[in-house]
Amino acid sequence: MADIIQLLSDHIANQIAAGEVIQRPASAVKELMENAIDAGATEIQLVIKDAGKELIQVIDNGKGMSPTDARMSFERHATSKIRNIDDLFTIRTMGFRGEALASIAAVAKVELRTRQLTSEAGTRVVIEGTEVKLQEPCAMNPGTNISLKNLFYNVPARRNFLKSANAELRHILEEFTRIALAYPAIGFRLNNNGTDQFILSGGSLKARILGLLGNHYDKKLVPVEENTELLNISGFIGKPEAATRTRGMQFFFINNRFIRNNYLNHAVVKAYEGLIEKETFPFYVLFLEIDPKRVDVNVHPTKQEVKFEDDQMMYAYLNATIKHALARYNIAPSLDFSLNTDIQQLAAVNMPETERQREQTQKGYLFNVFTSENQAHHIERKDSLKAWKSLYEIAQTPIEPQVNPQPEAPYEQTVVSQGSMYEENEQRAEIGSNMLLIHGDLLATPVKSGLMMIHIRRAQERIWYERLQREWQSQAAPSQRVLFPSSYELPPQDAILLNEALPDLARIGFDIAPFGQHTFVVQGLPPGLPPGDEKNVIDEVVDHLKHEATDVAEKRTDLLLAHMARHLSRNTKAISQHEAQEALIDELFACNQPEYTSGGKKVFVLIKTENLDAMLG
C-alpha cells in the first residue's frame, strides 16, 4: 500500500498558522505593535485604511534589525526571545512564538523597512505569499516601518468572513486601547483613513486612561496599590457611579500582558457587592505583577488566556485588595483592627490604668458579660429584651395588601365584561371589576373560571413592546424635547457602535446627535421614559451590539424595542387607581400575545376554581 502521510509545504503550513494567529486585521495590529514594544520603541505610530483591509502600517523608533535578522524574522519559529526550554517559563516579552511575521507574510503583501542605530543604511524587504520578492538597502531613520497591504488577498474565503468596516475598526481600537494602556510611558498615535484619531504622549497611567477612555472618568478613579509576597497589584478601579451596563471597560494585565480571566473578574465584582446594581459592571484597569514561573502564558496563540499556579490564592488577594481600596477612600465600610499612629499617641492609650479605674471597669455590665463563660452573645440587658422583641415583631409583620376602595358587595355579584378579553380554549375569560392589588406588584381579579393573577410590570412591558412595534412600522414615534440636553462620552469602540444604532434609536423617539469625536448629546427622549434612564437604554443597546453574533443583526430591532419596553414599564404607581387597573387589563388583552413578555416570561396565570378547591382540601 502506498504511503499517504507527507509533510506540508512551508506555504500551506504558514497559512494554517495564520488561521490561528491572524484571524482579522486587529490580530495583525496586535502582533506588529507588540513587536515594536519588544524592540524598545518609545514612539509607535499605527496607520490603517479601510479598517485594516487595505493597509496596516506600524512605525516605531526601536532598535531595528540587521539585514540578516530582517530576512530571518519572516521564518516560522524564528524568534529572538527563546534560547532554551527554561526561557519559555520566564517570559516577560510580548511575542515569543516566532509565528507572527511568518503568518502575516502568508496572507498579505508585506513591506519591511528597518535600520539599526549603528548602521548607515537600512534594509527593505518585500514579501508576497511567503515569497521574498526583493531585499535591498534603503535610507530611513533608525527603527522599523512595516506595512501590510491587502490582508487575505490570497485567501478569499477568509476575507469574505470579515465583518463590516465599522466592526473591524472596533476590534482594532480594542487592541490599540489594551496595548496603549499597558504601556503608558510609550507615546502612541493612531491614524485612521488619513485622520489622527489618537495622539497619546508618554506619561502616567491615569493620564493614559483619560486620554483613551474619556475625561469623564477623571473624578471616578480610585488608585489601587498592594504589594504581597505572591503578587503586586496596582492600577485604578472606578467608583460605584462609574459602573455601566456594558462590558468592555475591564482590563487585566499580567506582567503587562492583557488577559481575559472570568475567575479574577468575579473577584473584583464580588468586592463591589452591595455598592453597584445587579447586571452592571465595575470599571477597572489592574496590573498584576507575578513571578513568570507561577503563570503559563503559552496557553493560546493570542496569549490572552493564562493559567495560574494557585488560582484561589490570586482570587483572595485580588478581592481583599479591591475591598481595601474602596474602604480607604470611604466608598465601602471596613473593619480595621490596627490603631492609627495618631491614636496611639493619646494619653488614654499610653498612660497606665489606675487601680480605681480598674475597679470601676470591673463593675460595668459589658465587662461582666465578656468575662463570663458563654455569655458574650447575651449583651443586651434583661429589661431591654422585651423592647427588642416588640421591635423585631414589628419588622417581621407583613405589609397589609392594598385593597381598592370598593363598595361592599357579595362575591356572587355580576361579572362585568371588559371589552377585549384573552381567549383561551375557545372561551372568553371575563374579568371582573373587583380587583385586588397585592404588594404593588400583582393584580388579582376573579374571572369566570377561577382567579387570574397578573404581573403588572410584565403586563406593561408587553403593552409597550407592541405599541413600540406599531410606531416603528409607521415610523411615527414621537420625541419629547428635553429642557437640558445631556452629553455622554463613550470609549472609541463603543462610540462606533452607537453611531451605527442612531437611526434605529431615532425611530423609537430618541434625538441623539454626535458632538465631537466620541461624545453624543441627547436632545430628545421617547415620551414616558423615566428621567435619567436614557443612559441605561443606550448602555444596553451598545452592550448587545458589542456581543451580538453575525446572525443576530436581523434581530437588532426586536432587541432594541424589548430594551425600551422594559424601561418604560417601570411605572408601577400608575395602576394604583381602579380605572388605571381596568385600562391596563383592557390594553393587555388587546395585545396580539398578552400571555408572555417579549423575553418569554409569563405575564399572568389562571388558577381554576377546581384548583383553588383542591388547595383548600
Image (cartoon, helix red, strand yellow):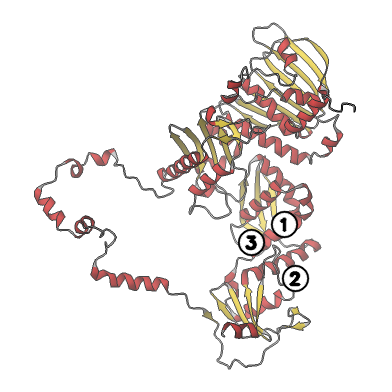
Q: Which residue is mark 1?
A: 559
Q: In the drawing, what numbered circle is on residue 567?
A: 3
Return the x and y of residue 378 as percentages of the image width and height. 27, 62
Return the x and y of residue 149 as percentages of the image width and height. 80, 26
Residue sitting at x 44%, y 43%:
320
Q: Amino acid at mark 1?
A: Leu
Return the x and y of residue 461 as percentages of the image width and height. 67, 67
Residue count near mark 1 (Cα–Cα under 10 Å), binned few <14, some 14–19, many ≥20: some
SS label for mark 1? helix
Assess whether mark 3 and mark 1 are in contact (beta carbons under 8 angstroms).
no
Tell me which numbered mark, 2 or 1, is placed earlier along the sequence. 1
Farthest front residue in view: 1
Of residue 317 and residue 216, the one placed in the foreground of this image is 317
Q: CA distance from mark 2 to mark 1?
A: 17 Å
Residue sitting at x 53%, y 31%:
294
Return the x and y of residue 100 as percentages of the image width and height. 72, 25
Q: Amino acid at mark 2?
A: Gln
Q: Amino acid at mark 3?
A: His
Of residue 78 and residue 497, the one placed in the foreground of this image is 78
Q: Which residue is mark 2?
A: 593
Image quarter where the N terminus lies is top right
SS label for mark 2? loop
SS label for mark 3? helix
Total tally of numbered discs in the picture: 3
Farthest top residue in view: 120
